[in-house]
Image (spheres, rainbow, N blue to C red):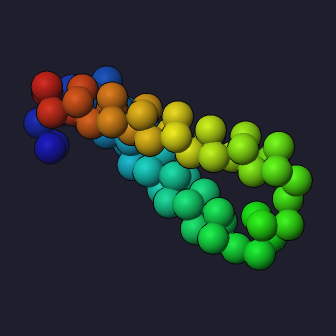
Amino acid sequence: MSDLQPHQQRVVAEKKELDDKREKLGAFKNTDMFASLPWQEQERLNTQAHIMTMYSAVLGERIAAF
């Protein structure tokens, strides 16, 4: 992917960073600390994870179109 334009390289880097954060959030959701949070905060984190997944999918589509 070294033949990508600078803006395309930024999209690839953005997706990688997002996917790393998404993985960490997913791991956190399997901890006792997550389970101890109020249900409202758990729902917010679940919503955040869902939106991150959708965002990652869009970035993946953009990268595939390069």
- Residue sitting at the far bottom: 32
Q: Is residue 45 above or below residue 61?
A: below
Where residue 1 appears, as percent x and y from the top left, is 14, 44
Q: Residue at x 72, y 44 (%)?
A: 43
- Residue sitting at the far front: 39
Q: Is residue 63 above or below residue 21?
A: above
Nearer to us in this view, 48 or 35: 35
Quarter placement of the C terminus = top left
Nearer to us in this view, 66 or 25: 25
Q: Residue at x 63, y 71 (%)?
A: 30
Q: Residue at x 31, y 24 (%)?
A: 7
Q: Is residue 37 above or below residue 17?
A: below
Does residue 5 appear left or right of residue 57 in this picture? left
Q: Determine the image quadrant of residue 6.
A: top left
Q: Is residue 25 above or below residue 45?
A: below
Q: Determine the image quadrant of residue 59.
A: top left
Where residue 14 appears, as percent x and y from the top left, is 42, 38
Nearer to us in this view, 8 or 38: 38
Where residue 63 appears, as percent x and y from the top left, is 22, 32
Does residue 39 appear left or right of residue 3 in this picture? right
Residue 48 in sight from this viewpoint: yes
Residue 6 in sight from this viewpoint: no
